[in-house]
Amino acid sequence: MIKTITKYIAIFTVFAYFLLPKSAFAQAVDYRKIIRITPVILNINLNPGQQQSYDLRLDNLINQPLGIQLSLETLDTTDELTGMVFGNPHANSPFVSWILLSRKQFIIQEKDSQTFSLNVKIPKNAKLGSYTSVIFITPLLSTANQKNSPNVISRIGVLAFANIGTPKEVPTEKLAKILTFNFDQEKNKINAIIRVQNTFNFNLSSKANITLEPILFGKNQIIELEDKRILAGKVRKWIEPVNLSNGIYKADLAVSLGEGRIIYKTIFFSVPSFTYILKYLVILIILLLIFLLRKRLKKAFFILYKG
């Protein structure tokens, strides 16, 4: 019975592959083998009233024409782990209205290249600070049977980060602050949790590391964390697994914000956690009190029993 079912599943899969439209399998296509985009991040530095044009190049890597559609969208920058979320219709930024695409639809011939431009014009009354946007590039691939409904290979985002105006010199403590630094211990896993908020009105690039020092014995550990861009006014989060033996530790967090500016935080913690130790310590004290007062407790229970 099982062999028969397996045979029919295999036959159905083969027929599906040849009979269904190729778009049903489009998710397996790796766009990096089809198109190359340069650059993938635009860093824009302008003052109010200025305008500038930025070119992007697209290379068709395959042996057939490739259709291209372009669109501009805002970014939702509320996600702490990734820093941004695509496709939120409620995200809003005036920066999109300051950008004009030189064209929105075109075809790149096989093994050929094309460029398009972003014309950025900053209003004279623009508020100083940082802005973000994304240029979505959608490659379209047609087959002989699908000229009127080409396959969408993927939507590829080119990030545009803009600093409007020149940041003023401010003390390091006013650039950013460490909101969270602790070690979460759950189900035999230990994760360092770090949250840093950019309190400045310009984007910051951060590089963080943790130094772990055992209080009694053992070797120090230095953990390098992933570099992250922290957008103006936003929070970025790190979750880093660590491997520690039982003991008490001193943990020093250093977050570099560039140009020699660093913010610090130090905490002490234990493995197992202090909460875990306290719970069992309370149980131990209760058991010890019962043992020491066992005669009095026995007498009290006897009196209650006799009435």
Image (tube, rainbow, N blue to C red):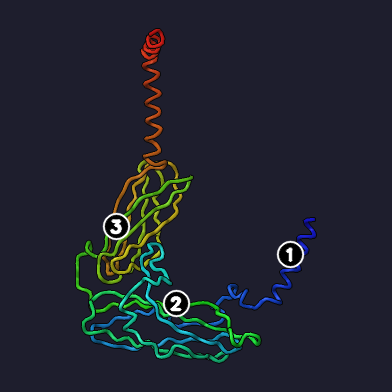
Question: Which is more N-terminal, label 1 or label 2?
Answer: 1
User: Alpha carbon of mark 3 to alpha carbon of mark 2: how far?
Assistant: 30 Å
Badge 2 amino acid = Gly
Q: Which residue is mark 1?
A: 9
Secondary structure type for disc 3:
strand
| Residue, disc 3 | 178
- Residue 157: image tag: 2
Residue in the foreground of this view, choosing between 137 and 91 = 91
| Residue 54 visible here | no
Query: Which mark sits nearer the N-terminus, 1 or 3?
Result: 1
Q: Nearer the viewer, residue 83 or 141?
A: 141
What residue is at 48 percent from the left and 45 percent from the top?
187
Image quarter hosting the N terminus: bottom right
Position in image of residue 68 (x %, y %): 50, 86
In the displayed structure, would residue 60 be above or below residue 207? below
- At 58% from the left and 81% from the top, the residue drawn is 151
Q: Position of residue 240 (x, y in %)?
A: 42, 56
Residue at 76% x, 68% y: name it: 11
Q: Is residue 249 left or right of residue 32?
A: left
Disc 2: CA contacts within 10 A as few (<14), some (14-19) or many (>=20): many
Quadrant of image for the C terminus: top left
Sort mark 3 into few (<14), some (14-19) or many (20+) by Cα contacts within 10 Å.
some
Estimate the spatial distance between the alpha carbons at disc 1 and disc 3, rounded to whole Å: 55 Å
Tell me residue 213's x, y (percent).
36, 48
**Residue 89 position within the rendered picture, expressed as x and y whole percent measured from the top left:** 40, 72
**Which image quarter: residue 62?**
bottom right
Q: Does residue 207 appear in this view?
A: yes
Disc 2, disc 1: CB below 8 Å?
no
For discs 2 and 1, the disc positioned in front in the rendered view: 1
- Please, is residue 222 above or below residue 296 in the view? below
52 is higher (above) or lower (below) than 162 = below
Amino acid type assigned to the residue bearing label 1 in the image: Ile
